[in-house]
Image (cartoon, rainbow, N blue to C red):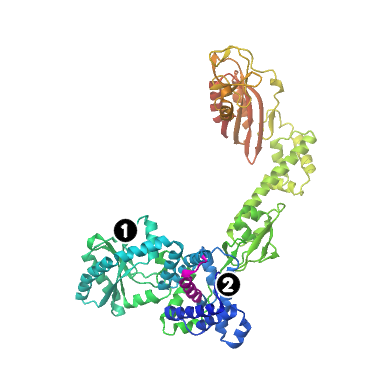
Amino acid sequence: MDNLFAFTYEEKKQMAAQTAAILEEEIGLKGDAIQAVYLIPDIEEGKLTMEEVEAQYNPQVLRILHGLNRIQQLYQKNPVIESENFRNLLLSFAEDMRVILIMIADRVNLMRQIRDTKNVEAKLEVSQEAAYLYAPLAHKLGLYKLKSELEDLSLKYMEHDAYYMIREKLNETKASRDAYIEAFIKPVEEKVKAAGIHCHIKGRTKSIHSIWQKMKKQKCGFEGVYDLFAIRIIIDCPEAQEKMQCWQAYSIVTDMYQPNPKRLRDWLSVPKSNGYESLHITVLGPEQKWVEVQIRTERMDEIAERGVAAHWRYKGVKGETGLDEWLTNIRTMLENSEGIEAMDQFKMDLYEDEVFVFTPRGDLFKFPVGATVLDFAYHIHSKIGNQCTGGRINGRVVSIRQILKSGDQVEILTSTNQKPRQEWLNIVKTSRAKSKIRLALKETQVKDGLFAKEMLERKFKNRKIEQDEAIMFHVVKKMGFKEVSDFYKQIAEGIIDVNSVIEKYIELRDGEKTVIGDNVARSASEFELDDSKFAGLNPQASDDTLVIDRNLKGLDYQLARCCQPIYGDPIFGFVTINGGIKIHRMDCPNAPELRRRYGYRVVKARWSGKGSSQYSITLRVIGNDDIGIVNNLTSIISKDEKLVLRSINIDSHDGLFSGNLVVMLEDTSRLEQLVKKLRAVKGVKQVERI
């Protein structure tokens, strides 16, 4: 069944016989399943066709072979096997329970046969699949012996040194371990039997793989793993007395040895959802060693040992409700004397509400039934979804509406010209895709709104009409819009003619001239203050003095434009190519690069004198775009006779304004006072010097 190794036809026939033996002896399968296994080499070699199988054999044989064939097709998609999704897809594709059991038995046999193979790469790949796929499947089905063998062999092939180190340690300590188990069991057995409880007690060493996992999890050496073995007390009693006698045995053990209450697991009072019943307790035995004790009855032990899905959750293999019910049904079938025969009638109907699909790389994703190519695109990434124009399913080009089916290999087709549409919400099935589409539509609406707003403002300027926010607000209301965004959306889509908006604006403006005057507060939107009237307000000669390097005064210098230093700023000088000196702030964004590359041209500088000149600084202001916000900002500056507002340039969008104020002031203390006042203005969120 595995194409990684070049087995001859004779070898395949021999391996089929070995796999059949595992199925019959270890699992209990017979009849059609065994017959199907013997036919696999003939089908692979082309000596037998499916049509001939249908004509010559029981329909159940054909169904099993069909399930195996479907799974072979899944493997051709190069799936990422280390995923719960692939295990689930495998189960849903198999159709018949026996297909999975055959695959597990075949993998156990293959792992046994490749011990001495020279194809190391193939050996590792097969071992990884055994560890990540087949061992968990065997665990879920309660095939613990096969599960342990798969785990141990995969560890042996993948981590050779770790495997043999643990095996040697176990061999070295076997005699003392056996003696300890016997010393522990003997007094317990005597007391339990003295209490009138019929039982037998056995000890078992944990698998090499299990010990290795504990060493890694606990980050310790072999000697640090205290629970290398478990003791199992199996009671023989009528079903009506099971709980009573189990708790009685528990009481005897915990009277003899100190229990760890944190390690008590009571699955007698409330059995696991899959039917597992037992009492687990860890006690401090002789020589101060922790020992796990499991207490159960013969009936419970039989179910746990050979029943499918006995306690796979206990080992941390996660599952789902539908899988629980299905596995419990299989366990019930195997427990009944006619259970194996009844499996002929069993057809898996798992995951009827889910589909599993591949990416071209082999990654596997789960979707609800009815999900489309567009759902898949948004699952990959929002940008992929927004630009999706369709897809390729198994190489065939399909639309975004195409519904996905389990096993599909999906590739998404995109275009930079594509944009999300409102009707896409009716195409997708998943809430994830719906929320991403709504977000994209909202972002598109915002962009369209900005575009429409800019277009409208441009038209106003072309006609030399000054736009007033208050009048514009009335225009929007008069045209029947409750939301400004809807108004701009219709402009962007060409539903509303811009010229008709302007005519409506003029009509309202002229009709309300007595109300609208120069003193009406305006929004920050597109506010600009022409600085031509301040053109002459440059720093003039004063008693400000710059002391450069070693008390040198009177040198030719300029204030750097990149950081606009003012009196009071920590500064340094930089000697330019033409010999002049530029003064930079210490925290200038260019300072680190200047020091790193031209450290030899950096000179010390400091301010001296009184600081009476006026310097230009730029402040970045961000806040809510409230009516009158500009007036509030400018009034603070105008009230201070020692401050001069040189220019203001503010834009607004989405209810926020942001812009730059260029102010003339004397020094850093005056700057700090101004920033503090501006930050106190209602609606201002941020004031920073740039």
Q: Nearer the viewer, residue 229 or 399?
A: 229
115 falls in the magenta region: yes
Label 2 packing within 10 angstroms: few (<14), some (14-19), many (20+): some
Magenta residues, start to end: 100-119
Apparent side of residue 625 relative to residue 478 in the rendered image (left or right): left
Amino acid of disc 2 = Gln
Q: Marks 1 and 2: which is nearer the front?
A: 1
Indicate which disc residue 223 carries: 1
Residue 317 visible (yes or no)? no
Apparent side of residue 334 relative to residue 653 in the rendered image (left or right): left
State the residue at coordinates (62%, 51%).
439
Q: Position of residue 60 (x, y in %)?
A: 55, 83
Q: Which of 289 and 491 is in front in this view?
A: 289
Residue 593 visible (yes or no)? yes
Q: Nearer the viewer, residue 676 or 179?
A: 179
Residue holding disc 2: 72
Q: Tell how many labels.
A: 2
Label 1 packing within 10 angstroms: few (<14), some (14-19), many (20+): few
Quarter of the picture holding the C terminus = top right
Q: Where is residue 414 in the image (x, y as percent from the top left)?
A: 69, 56
